[in-house]
Image (cartoon, rainbow, N blue to C red):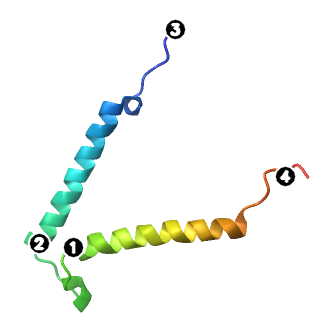
Amino acid sequence: MAEKQYFFDKPDNVKWVLRVFYAICALLVIADFVIHRHISVDWERIPAFYALYGFVACVLLVVLAKLMRKLVMRKEDYYDE
């Protein structure tokens, strides 16, 4: 009996989904220049501010997670002792 193939098991489907994702991201950045925003602070006037803010926040989360790993990581046989 053959193993069941799922949607993301095929590399062509993964490429297709990533292309759609990148296209949506590009459209959202372009929409940022077209749609009027009601801003409350001056730094929100920076073009693509929310895209940059999200990217920087994501990078900071990854860096902090790597640093925290050094603090909370236990030995492989922690529960076997």
Q: Is residue 50 left or right of residue 27?
A: right
Query: In 3D space, how far apart are the residues under numbered discs 4 and 2 (Cα atoms)?
Result: 54 Å
Q: Is residue 43 above or below residue 30?
A: below
The disc, 2 or 3, on the residue closer to the chain's N-terminal end is: 3
Query: In 3D space, how far apart are the residues under numbered discs 3 and 4 (Cα atoms)?
Result: 39 Å
Query: In 3D space, how far apart are the residues under numbered discs 4 and 1 (Cα atoms)?
Result: 48 Å
The amino acid beneath tag 1 is Ala
Q: Residues within 10 Å of mark 4 (few under 14, many from 20)?
A: few
The amino acid beneath tag 2 is Phe
Q: Which residue ends up furthest to the top in the rendered image?
A: 1
Residue 7, percent from left and from top: 37, 30
Query: In 3D space, how far apart are the residues under numbered discs 2 and 1 (Cα atoms)?
Result: 8 Å
Q: Which residue is label 2 attached to?
A: 33
Q: Find numbered disc 2 in the image and state the secondary structure of the residue it sits on.
A: helix
Q: Find numbered disc 3 in the image and state the secondary structure of the residue it sits on.
A: loop
Q: Which residue is label 3 attached to?
A: 1
The amino acid beneath tag 3 is Met
Q: Residue at x 68, y 67 (%)?
A: 70
Q: Which residue is label 4 attached to?
A: 79
Q: Which residue is label 1 attached to?
A: 48
Marker disc for residue 21: none
The disc, 4 or 2, on the residue closer to the chain's N-terminal end is: 2
Q: Find numbered disc 1 in the image and state the secondary structure of the residue it sits on.
A: loop
